[in-house]
Image (cartoon, rainbow, N blue to C red):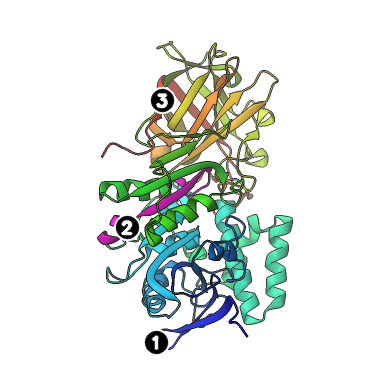
Amino acid sequence: MPESPVIQEQLRCSDGTALKSTLWKPEGQGPWPCLLMRQPYGRAIASTVTYAHPSWYAKGGFAVLVQDVRGRGGSEGEFLGFQQEASDSTATLRWIRQQPWCNGKVGTYGFSYQGLSQLLVSGSEHLPDALAPAMCGLDERLHWASEGGCHWWALGLGWALQLAAQRCQRQGDGQGWIEIRRSLENGSFLHDGLALLERFDPMGMGLRWLNSDPERPEGWMRYEPPEELWQRPMLLIGGWHDPHLRGVLDLWRRSTAAGGSSLLRIGAWSHLNWQGGLDQLQLEFFQEHLCGRGPAEPLPATQLMEVGSGAWQQRSPRECSGQRWSLASKGLAAEGRLCQDSTPSSEVVIVHDPWRAMGGRGGHLGLDAGPVDRRDLDGRTDVACFSTARFDRPTELFGQPQLELEAASDQPGFDLCVALSVCHGDGRIEQLSTGFSRVLGASAQVSQRRTVSLQPLLVNVEAGCALRLSIALAAWPQIAVNPGDGSQPRSGVGPNHRVITVSLQLSSAALSILPMVGAN
């Protein structure tokens, strides 16, 4: 009988741990170049939420190996998170090149955990020949768990609890799995998630992140691949509505600085919804770099998707549309203006009532990630809104929005939760980008310059629409609610949360559109 194109493989590491994999082979006689994905969610899934099934890539001429990382799925050992992956990735690459079905060429692909696992190797001797990391980054603090001094609350808890539930499943703790799953389905994890992690995954990477200070790099890992890796061909994939976008941009910056031949694609995608994805492009990328079969025309180095039309544009992240608006108001929170001149202005005062904390919606940190209508949120007078006049011509916004303004609180702690939206003629307030900044301690009560960096974007605003900047003091559950006592938030609202009043000084306030990646 002919050999099955799907084979279960096993690698025995130097410490005796067995790592289990599934191999899909093309028809005919090998050897072939191999595509490798290493992931912690069970190899049968093979990240098919964002990629074509491995059998599709096998039909394109590749052996495809999907491996359960140590301590997950069918693999032996204890799961320790990213810190375990360098040695196991190196062992796997070495092992693949020794197999009779591999011709010595190996490419790696995958997103999120599977993205970073490609970049973690223990030396330069066994590197992938080409890589396609998607939606990941090297810095645990800045690319995986927090921004602006705020933990990614709902996302961070949800992901950590997914890993904890799979740990329960692996240990045969069905009741623990059910308890975690119900908390995620009914939303109670937003308040009880830390306690669940303490019970079911006390040594897990997710809990370590949530217990670490997001304002300081101490205690966080920033991984450094061998310098030689940056010379390898890379296909880097990100999404405008994905929390790891800044990590992808950092990878692109480092690859291009090292002279590597990297491709960059950023779609109008969230972490799990790629609207069909980039499988054909990825196949062509690996055929070029592992098989020597280049495309009929060279692939553009960078292509970014415009949010509204979905059209791809050949743009560089070092470019930007460069607008700058001043913030003006006569004091009413709902009637602020964005002006491209120096209009005299007064302060705006907004109050955070923890009983009615402002909600966070959509954007890159939302469980409902992507553009959303926030007209009901902007209708509240505890959010300060600043709008342009209606544009008389189509206007492009391209780059990273950044807000600078002076602000002070009456309490030793407050958050600035900022959204950039388009006001449509039909009344919709379409939120496009969000950003967050947390201030804790005595400095919160001193009026000084604050900076909020928002998620990068590329969008064409139609004539007849206006741009709006919204500033609130909470965005629950995307970030935990600031208690106002100077401590780092650890959940939603509690009985000790304080009312917080913040004064926004507008005389030198500005919203600017800057390059996503600096010139250096």
Residue at 44% in and 74% down? 31
What's under tag 3, amino acid-wise? Ser
Q: Residue at x 55, y 56 (%)?
A: 156
The magenta span reads 227-247
Residue annotated with mark 1: 15
| Nearer mark to the viewer, of 2 and 3 | 2
Front residue (pair 437, 433): 433
Q: Quadrant of the C terminus?
A: top left
Residue nearest the viewer, comparing 483 with 75: 75
Residue behind mark 3: 321
**Residue type of the residue flagged with mark 2:** Arg
Disc 1: CA contacts within 10 A as few (<14), some (14-19) or many (>=20): few
- Residue 136 at least partly seen: no
Mark 3: few/some/many CA within 10 Å (<14, 14-19, 20+): some
Q: Secondary structure at mark 1?
A: loop
- Confirm whether the magenta stretch covers residue 377: no
In this view, the residue in front, 113 or 512, is: 113
Label 3 residue SS? loop
Residue 494: x and y, percent? 63, 50
Q: Give residue 98's mark.
A: none
How crowded pointer 2 is (Cα within 10 Å; few <14, some 14-19, many 20+) is rated as many
Instruction: Give the quarter of the image for residue 6.
Output: bottom right
Per the model, the C-alpha gap separating discs 3 and 1 is 54 Å
Which of the two discs, 2 and 3, labels the residue nearer the N terminus? 2
Disc sitting over residue 232 in the figure = 2
Q: Nearest the camera: 166 or 156?
A: 166
State how far apart marks 2 and 3 are (Cα).
Answer: 31 Å
Please say if the residues under marks 1 and 2 sit with CB atoms less than 8 Å apart.
Answer: no
Spatial separation of the CA atoms under disc 1 and disc 2: 29 Å
Viewed as shown, does residue 217 lie left or right of 265? left
Image quadrant occupied by the N terminus: bottom right
Dot 3 or dot 1, earlier in sequence: 1
